[in-house]
Every structure is written in C-alpha cells, then in structure tokens.
Amino acid sequence: MVVIHRDVYSPQKDVMAARHDNSKNYNNTDGYGIAADIGTTTVAISLFSLGNNRYCGNITENNSQTELGADVMMRIMHANMGKGMLLHKMITEQLEDMAGRISEGVCSAGAIKRMVVTGNTTMCHLFLGRDLRGMAGVPFKPAYKGSVNITGKEIGFKKYPDINIHVMPGVTAHVGADAVSALCSLELYSTDKIQLAIDIGTNAEIILNNKGRIYVCSAAAGPAFEGQGIKCGIRAGRGAINGIKITRTTGNIVLDVIDTDNVESGISKEELIPKGICGSGIVDAIAELLKTGVLKPDGYLMGCEEALQNGVKPSIAERIKKDKKGNSFVIYNKEKNYTGYNGNKKEQDNRQFEIIITQNDIRNIQLAKAAIQAATEVLLEEAGISLDNIDEVKIAGVFGKFIHPDAAVLFGLYPDIDKDKMEFVGNAAGNGAAQALVDDNFKKLALEYSGKMEHIELAGKNSFQEKFLNAMELKKWQAVYN
C-alpha cells in the first residue's frame, strides 16, 4: 500500500536575501536590481529594491542551455565547435525573460538599474560570450581573470540595454564565481575556526577554511540531484515526490508529494498525483532501499527472487521488476494507487503512470556521492586534518536545503558528524550575488578572496581516484586523514 502525504512548500521561496547590516556601506541608489545565479542545470534570479534593499521575489528554472549538454564539458565542446554565440544568446535571452516576469507588476524595465551575476567559470564565460578554447584541455586557462563590469547593451540585452552588470570574480577554470560568492556570503575565512562548505550542484564546490588558509576544489557531481539523468526525475515542484518511507514489516510506502498551490485553489488531496521524483526524494529512496535490504552497499539492486531468498518481505520484493536494462524498484503505479482524476485531463496527461528507481539511477547517485566525498577527503588530506577537527559544516545549494539529513548521512552523501556542527544554508552563491548587488564592499571582498583561495586540482592528486572508488560504497562517511 502507498500512502501519499501532501508536503506544502515551494522551493522558489528559498529567498536569496541580502544581509541587512547597518554597519556596511549599502548603496542608496533608487530603482531595482537583479541577482542572478547561473547554474549548469538551473538558473535562479532575485529582484531587490535598491532604495531600501528590500527583497521582492525570485524565480528558479532549468537552464535553457541543457538542450546542448547536461554538463560544462559538453557546453565547452559545443562552444568550441561554433555554437558559442548560440549558447550566449540562449542564456542572455533567458535572463531577460526571467527578469521581465519577476518584475511584472513591480517595476518598469527602465527601473531595473543593476544586475550581479555569479556562476561557475564556464557559465560566466558563456554569459559574457568569451572564448572557451582555453577551457577545453590542460592547462585549462580561462579567457579572463577577476570581475567584469559591462552594460546590458554590450551583453546583448534588448529590453535592458542601460542596465549595469557586474560579473563576480572566479578563481580558476574549475572553480568559479559561485564558489567565491558562497565563501564571502558564508564568511568562510575565520582565523580561529576550521570550516567546511559543500555546495551541492551539477558541479559541487568544496571549500575548506583551515583557520584562514582556504582550500577549494570542484567535483563533477552531475545533475542527478536536480532530477536530470534520473528515469522518473523532475525538478522540485508540484507533484514531485520529495520524501519516501518504506515500512520494513508491512512493505507500506509513504510518499511526501510537493503541493505548492492546492491549499489556495481548493483541489482535493486525492487529485495530488505524483508526477516524478526530485533530488530529495531520490536521496530518501536510496536510504530506504538500503534499510530494506534490497539494495546492497556496493549499489547492486537485487532481483525479486534474490531479495526473497535474502529474507526481504514479499510485499517489498514484489515491487522489484527486471527488464533488459536491469532491475528497478516501483515506488508508485497507477494499478495500486489510482483514485481517479475527477475530469482533470491536464493532471492525467502530466503524470507518470509508474514511478521507479532504476539500477542506473542508483549508479548516478553513487557517482555523484563518491565525487563529493572523495573531493572533500582530498582537501582534508591537503590540510592535514580530519572531520573531527572541523568546527562548522555548511551544506549549500537549493537542493541541499531540502534533503533529509539522516537519509543523506546513512549512505555517505553528508559526513557523519555532530549535527550541531552542520548548517543548511540554501543558495549561498545566490545570496552572495544579492549581497554584492547592494554592497560595494562585498564586491571588493570577493575580489580579494578570489586571489587568496588555493585551488586543489583533483586530476593532479594521485589519491583522488582511490578515494573516489572507496567512496562508491553506500555507507556512512567517516573520513579521517592519515
């Protein structure tokens, strides 16, 4: 039996808010400004009133460039094959469109005076229309250094030609402005603390501050946590499964399904039909399958007969099916859960008739988890410390904020440390862009620390591959430097 619980929240309300600290020199320029975080998979923008630094709202949506590749290497390849200006046009047009929608009913186009942009190095290059040939191979050299100031007209904006745009500074080809923005927003430069930040996204940035000495690296985690590359994966939004519990004694499944607008519209609970599974639901699913015993720590999903032979309850084992691509576990299907659509044709057309977790989905999560864990362990090794030495751990990224920590710790996505040391900080990179929008001193701070961060190139570390292979195991992460 599957029970569906309504989970009322909107991931778009993860506010990228600037800090209202009267000790800082905030600008008093009239008009409005936009803070933009261009991620490989998603783009998030926020609108602020510059006269009083008031937050006005935000929009998050898929990066339109994903049509030409899910990761940065595919984008670089396409750019170097003559599609660079197409990619540039795609992102600039998307930002203009998003800016128009977020400001509708709030201000005119001419009232938007400023924009601050952050993102990884490739995304910033594509936004600026810069040459990416130096990013295609060793020694991986970006086309520019530092921050960039440019006008809307120069960038190709048609609706906002007079807007002043500030692109935040990056560190290297593999560590971009998003890492710098997060570091400064989270103040990861304390001289009396050891601080670790993990920004979970398609490119995961890991920052380690060892009492003022700052190490940073980037790990290619892939877009699985954002619903991409997952069989039934979707972005967090209405109809997405974002929480799963499996009762081992009865085999009952409880699903938390996001409902962002039904309370106001009066649509009944029975019409809230799951459409797919988002990142936090995937994390829960992996943890729950491990607990039931159908998923082994090496990532192998048992077949039905094998599960029964290993003592798994029939009500759980019978949810495993096999096809030519391997085994999969059925979380939800029409036959067992269908309650009717009450004439809601749109709801019927948009839903999945069967929502499953496949062997390939599990492998994608393993690869992402292993990349993040191994990269973090390399930084710890570089600094000569262990997890036990760390005073603070910041889990950043919009996705990271909504994961259930116990599930993430169970299979090693998050380190197994004292919960009092761990903080979930949301979109730290976007917050940094928002702070830069209203505080010129923040821009200076970002430029200063972009030159102080020590980039650790994982490809040049012999221990990374070994750590990566070890981290593929789905178990608690208790990394210790030896």
Image (cartoon, rainbow, N blue to C red):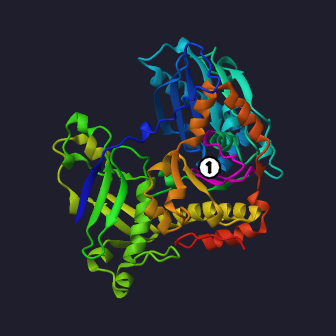
Q: Which residues are magenta?
A: 185-213
Q: Quick one: 271 or 263, which is closer to the camera?
A: 263
Residue at 54% x, 61% y: name it.
414
Dividing the image into 4 quarters, which one contains the N terminus? bottom left
What residue does disc 1 label?
71
Circle 1 sits in a helix, a strand or a loop, which is it? Answer: loop
Q: Quick one: 74 or 390, which is closer to the camera?
A: 390
Q: Amino acid at mark 1?
A: Asp
Q: Any magenta on residue 190?
A: yes
Residue 480 lies, in percent from the top left, at 66, 71
Q: Is residue 91 visible?
A: no
Residue 126 lies, in percent from the top left, at 68, 35
Dividing the image into 4 quarters, which one contains the C terminus? bottom right
Q: Residues within 10 Å of mark 1 (few under 14, many from 20)?
A: some
Q: Is residue 334 above or below residue 326?
A: above
Residue at 43% x, 55% y: name it.
280
Residue at 64% x, 72% y: name it.
469
Q: Quick one: 62 or 69, which is closer to the camera?
A: 62
